[in-house]
Amino acid sequence: MRKLAALFASPLAALFAVVPLAGCMSIADAGVLVDVTVIDRSTGQQLEVYRHRGQLYVAGTPGNRYAVVMRNKSAGRLLTVLSVDGVNALNGQTAATSQSGYVLSAWQAAEIAGWRKSMDDVAAFYFTSVADSYAGRTDRPQNVGVIGVAVYREAVPVPEPAVTMHQRQRGAGNEAGAAGAAAERRAAASDAPQPAAKAAAPAHDEARSELADSRLGTGHGERISAPTQYTAFRRASHTPSEVLTIRYDSRANLLAQGIIPRPPQRWTPDPTPNPFPGGFTPDPRG
């Protein structure tokens, strides 16, 4: 497979990462613009996806490294803001869709395997306890167990219309007014409110607290090479074109919550004879 491109971006600038991917991918969260899958890097297997009440889940193995793979399905560049446990995977800030992200070129994909530490490396993602997770260790454990990708289209420059001599003469006298109006529009755009991350409400019930303590989060692991570079990117809109979400937890927890269906039980005869199998005494034959 070709080398695939991902970009880290602020509203006007982005970081570009080149990541080689091999083999085919099946779809975990299939959006209109981007597909998202989760790979267990310790086994090399893509995690199976379970659908439950309109949500998607994968089962992680504690201690195993993993990566989020994003594939651009469109013919244009896209900005993807990656959130893990409610934390921006690129800059470590509490995640908001208006923040920096990775840019994917047309039809390309990228494997994001950790928290960005520099232009050259990341700290590996791995499944761990809430207390050991990066979010937990930075006092932000409320949103552990969820991976989110906010997707933005790139703004396309609008060509300027042809100007006649008459229009030039009329416009010469209005340059100051036009410049002032443009300045006002830019100021209004810069003042537009940005969406903020919404924190989950704390659990008050003791049973829910115990369940929360057993959930999986994402740790801050060893440094691994992941070179990248900056690129220019301008969003086409203030809000994402789509937001993709995958939740994760241990297999035991997903089974306990009924998210992973239990296999049907097969009946097997009891080899131990029963001394009281019937009711009243029947007549003998003959």
Image: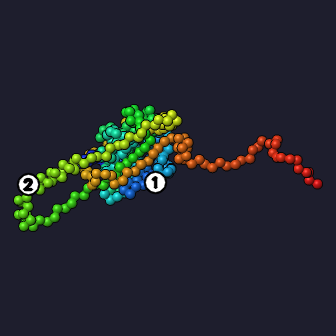
Q: What residue appears at the point 49 percent right and 51 percent down from the top-left corner?
A: 53
Q: What residue appears at the point 43 percent right and 49 percent down from the top-left corner?
A: 37
Asked which secondary structure carries label 2, the reply is helix
**In the rendered image, is residue 134 in sight?**
no
Residue 111 point in image, percent of width and height? 38, 47
Residue 105 point in image, percent of width and height? 31, 54
Q: CA distance from mark 2 to mark 1?
A: 56 Å
From the viewer's perspective, is 236 left or right of 149? left
From the viewer's perspective, is 232 left or right of 273? left
Say which quarter of the image contains residue 141: top left
Residue lying farthest to the front in this orientation: 204
Q: What residue appears at the point 59 percent right and 47 percent down from the top-left corner?
A: 262
Q: Which residue is mark 1?
A: 26
Residue 59 point in image, percent of width and height? 50, 44
Report the amino acid beneath label 2: Ala
Residue 209 point in image, percent of width and height? 49, 35
Quadrant the C terminus occupies = bottom right
Asked which secondary structure carries label 1, the reply is loop
Image marks 2 and 1: residues in contact by CB distance under 8 Å: no
Q: Which mark is residue 176?
A: 2
Is residue 31 positioned above or below 97 on the image? below
Report the amino acid beneath label 1: Ser
Q: What residue appears at the point 8 percent right and 58 percent down from the top-left corner?
A: 174
What is the crowding at mark 1: few (fewer than 14 residues within 10 Å), some, or many (at least 20)?
few
In primary-sequence order, the first of circles 2 and 1 is 1
Quadrant the N terminus occupies = bottom left
Camera-nearest residue between 15 and 208: 208
